[in-house]
Amino acid sequence: MGWNGVLNACTVLKSRGILVAMPAVESHEEAVRRELEKVLRSPGFANNERLSRFLRFVVEHHLEGKDHELKESVLAVEVFGRKPDYNPRQDAIVRTEAGRLRARLSEFYIGEGKDDPLVIELPKGGYAPAFRHVDTAAAPAEPALPAVPVVPAKRKPRRMVWPAALGILALAAGALTWRHSVVSRELVSIGVIPFENLSPDSANEYFADGLTDELIRNLSLIDGLAVRSQTSSFALRGKHWNVHEVGRQLDVDYILEGSVMRAAQQLRINAQFIRVRDDFALWSGKFDKELTDVFAIQEEISRGIVNSLRLKLGRGRRRYETSIEAYDLYLRSRALHARLGLLGYRPSIPLLEEAVRKDPSFAPAYAGLVDSYVRTTGFKNVPDRDDMLARMRAAADRAIQLDPLLAEAHAARAMAYARDANWEQSEKSFRRAIELDPNRSMSRGEFAINYLQVLGRNPEAIQQLRAAQKSDPLSPEIREYLSYGLLLGGRPDQAALICTGLPDDFPAKPECLGRALLGQGKIAEAIQVLAKAGNKGYLGIAYARAGRRAEAEDLAKKIAPNPFNELLIFAGLGDKGRALEALDRFTALGPVRVGRALNYPELASLRGDPRVKAIRRKLGLPQ
């Protein structure tokens, strides 16, 4: 029985003196249109007219029964303004934008739309959209028909009889239940274990780490693969592991592992690609080559994995043909970042500057320079700060010019824009970085803490950090960032759980846990933990809250001049005058650091003060 049959049945009941209360059943078209409008209102689409127009066009044509018109040639003309003689072999605009649309939809349903009952998808291999109902994806069994009670025809007054109405409606279950045979194509999740250095010289370990990192980067650019980020992978370095345990920790289906032996200019690399569920090697490769062939080896390993999974190589990949000297310097800089954290960025600058001198076309080195400039000038008022900021801006522009499809280049430029309080361009660049490589966790992490939290958009920041954690579950930096987002959101108990789970050797763990304990009101415990933290400002707050004012004052004297820590301590002591004086000195570090700090719960007492509002205006921060 179709919908007309249901209506006829209801008419019969009505003629017998029974008023049938029809339940409000949303049609498929209504549900799709409602979901479409929600997606288009989201930040990822509201700021991208091209993708919004693309999505609306394919959805509207589908609802009008015109899937047959959703061809590459039609879309090129109707959506992207190409001429009628458009040649897809010479212009890949439609295929390129389709890949971006899929990535943007995936981002939406990881974050804001994660609980939506209807999911809009653009399956690979075509341009007709598909719609998946999350709660009915498995096509439930037909419901049993409830008994229909006998109702006398002459009974008055007319009344609502729900069981009777539902009994008749149940006969049309096929007309009321949405069933779609479209199966969502899941991403293939991969973890890359740090390649083992078998070289006689342990100093070559950085090369094995660098190769691992570059493989993660290359695989992340392949459409259909979800690759765990460097920080989660490198958390397993040097540990004894088995396939099933690593698969559980990284939440992946496949693992890539291998070894590197380097002797002078000769390389020997072994790699194998393992399926976690049965510990089966799907692919393996052995390479004996000159060091000059390192990029070819990375490409060959990536292709071997893709072929073993029968996936099509994604577009937008770039193979860098750089010199061995430049590449070696680049890997050394990344090794400093990985080993020393924030302390490794300043000494990495000379290495990266030398790398771009040796190869002025090597985009990743320019992106690394921007990252190092940003972090160095953002945490200390270094003597050559102004010159470094100028070089930062130039390097950001150069990285994009050299490779407009390099995710970290866009993330680096986003950071540069934020340092200049150019918020609109910063957001566009961060979103472009995420669009190009949704699995790069640090793009999302930096977007969260250096943009969204600075502008007071903490709920969005938490969404981005949750998505980053999914692609990088073992990264202590991402977990640290998430804990601070939870603190800003007034959830110290959840923050404490995350901080407690950080590795004991993670430098920021005492500060993370101490701040969470302060938020919970556990002052005595916070003091014990914060005494081990490198940042003593929070310890001063804890002293002040414990009534140990003299110790807080003494600590402020010992750490001076340190405007940020002084700001924390004076705010904790309730001394607004000295706190604002310290804040004024702190503004030298720029809008990102100041804007984020002013949203900290520890500095809530300063908000609303006219002098703080004046500082915000001066730095280009919203009120």
Image (cartoon, rainbow, N blue to C red):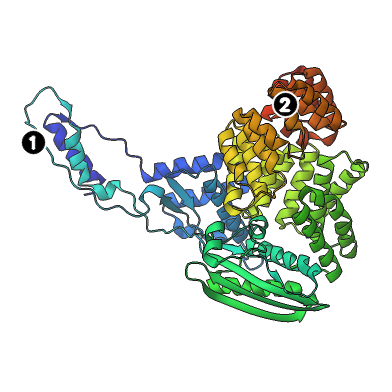
Q: Tell me the crowding category of disc 2: few under 14, some 14 to 19, or many 20 or more residues within 10 angstroms, Cα based.
A: many
Q: Residue at x 50, y 40 (%)?
A: 37
Which residue type does callout 2 highlight? Tyr
Closer-to-camera residue (209/607): 209
Q: Residue at x 42, y 52 (%)?
A: 132
The CA distance from mark 2 to mark 1 is 77 Å
Q: Give the label, 2 or 1, closer to the camera.
A: 2
SS category of the residue bearing label 2: helix
Asked whether residue 373 appears in the rendered view, the answer is yes
Q: Quadrant of residue 262?
A: bottom right
Which residue type does callout 1 highlight? Val
Residue 582, compared with residue 132, is above or below; it is above
Residue under pointer 2 = 543
Q: Residue at x 93, y 43 (%)?
A: 384
**Marks 2 and 1 in Cβ contact (< 8 Å):** no
Asked whether residue 188 appears in the rendered view, the answer is no
Location of residue 275 in the rendering, given as x and y in whole percent from the top left corner: 52, 69
Q: Which quadrant of the figure contains the C terminus?
A: top right
Of mark 2 and mark 1, the one earlier in the sequence is 1
Q: Quadrant of residue 499?
A: top right
SS category of the residue bearing label 1: loop
Location of residue 39 in the rendering, given as x and y in whole percent from the top left corner: 53, 43
Residue under pointer 1 = 150
Q: Is residue 456 left or right of residue 169?
A: right
The residue most toward the bottom is 288
Location of residue 142 in the rendering, given as x and y in whole percent from the top left corner: 24, 51
Location of residue 581 in the rendering, given as x and y in whole percent from the top left corner: 84, 23
